[in-house]
Amino acid sequence: MMSSQLRTSMALAIIFGIYAASAALTVGLVSSLYGFSCAQSFFTVNCAFPPDSAQVGPNYAVLALFLLVVSLVAVLKWRRAAAYPFFMLSAALCGAALLWDLVAQQPVIHGPKITNDTINILRAVIAASFVLLIILCRGQSYTLSRLSASVATSYALTGLSVIGFVELSESVFGVTELFLLYVMYAFGSFSLHLMTVCGFVAALGTRISAEGASA
């Protein structure tokens, strides 16, 4: 039977191994799909995203119309839902961002650096949360295969979120782009990551119950 110290060491090696591999995968995806020059430095990613340009295009009208339609549907159909206040606040903030860009038409200063830093911070937070989880669960019995699947899933979803942001950011600029980056960070990648962590912990509880019953 594997000792707790050995399992913890192997778990940490798996976390940082997938962490580094995901950086290489992100670099490869962004470079191949969009042609941006990207480089990897151990666990961090640095892509030469184009500078932000303040150009109001037809996508703003489409986004505003979509936001209006979804808000009306929420008012008519989901008014009693628990998430209704949060949803309407998010819609109001997005509408305010659109209006600001239409009036001010100012690009994001140091936009590429902000995007790279956000991606790297998100990826580092995911690794740190898994390390903390393993330290807290070091006395528990868990499988390294399930841990590997959870870590890989979190970073795969983060990579998809990065691609989604890069795709959408080509249509917006300024405050709207920063708002989109925040939404993708807080309510996209990180929320999905928390789901994978909860799945790992839930399976851990099931395993403990099964072992107790067999004993």
Image: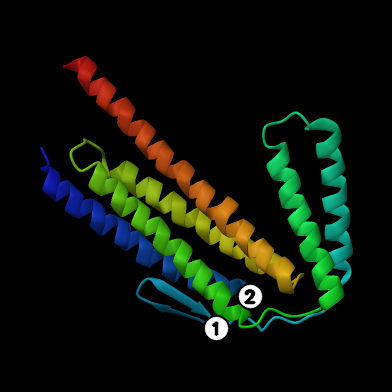
Question: Callout 2: few (<14), some (14-19), or many (20+) C-alpha neighbours within 10 Å?
Answer: few
The type of residue carrying mark 1 is Ser
Q: Quadrant of residue 100?
A: bottom right
Q: Quadrant of the C terminus?
A: top left
Identify the residue at image location x=76%, y=51%: 91
Q: Position of residue 32 (x, y in %)?
A: 57, 74
Residue type at mark 2: give it. Answer: Tyr
Residue 108 as seen in the image, left or right of residue 60: left
Assess disc 1: are there few (<14), some (14-19) or many (≥20) residues with their C-alpha within 10 Å of its C-alpha: some
Q: In which quadrant is the N terminus drawn? A: top left
- Position of residue 205 relative to residue 92, above or below, is above
Q: Residue 84 appears at what percent x and percent y?
A: 72, 37
Name the spot of residue 48 as percent of width and height, x first.
Answer: 57, 83
Q: Looking at the image, which is closer to me, 108 or 143?
A: 108
Q: Which residue is mark 2?
A: 34
* Residue at image location 83% in from the left, 59% down from the top: 63
The total of numbered circles placed on residues is: 2
63 w.r.t. 113: above or below: above
Image point (64%, 69%), residue name: 166
Alpha carbon of mark 1 to alpha carbon of mark 2: how far? 9 Å
Please give left or right for residue 70 compared with residue 120 in the image.
right
Quick check: marks 1 and 2 in contact, CB under 8 Å? Answer: no
Label drawn at residue 37: 1
Residue located at (73% from left, 80% from top): 107
Q: Nearer the viewer, residue 198 or 2?
A: 198
Tell me the element at label 2: helix
- Tell me if I can see residue 24 in this picture: yes
Disc 1 secondary structure class? loop
Q: Is 183 left or right of 149, judged from the image as shown? A: right
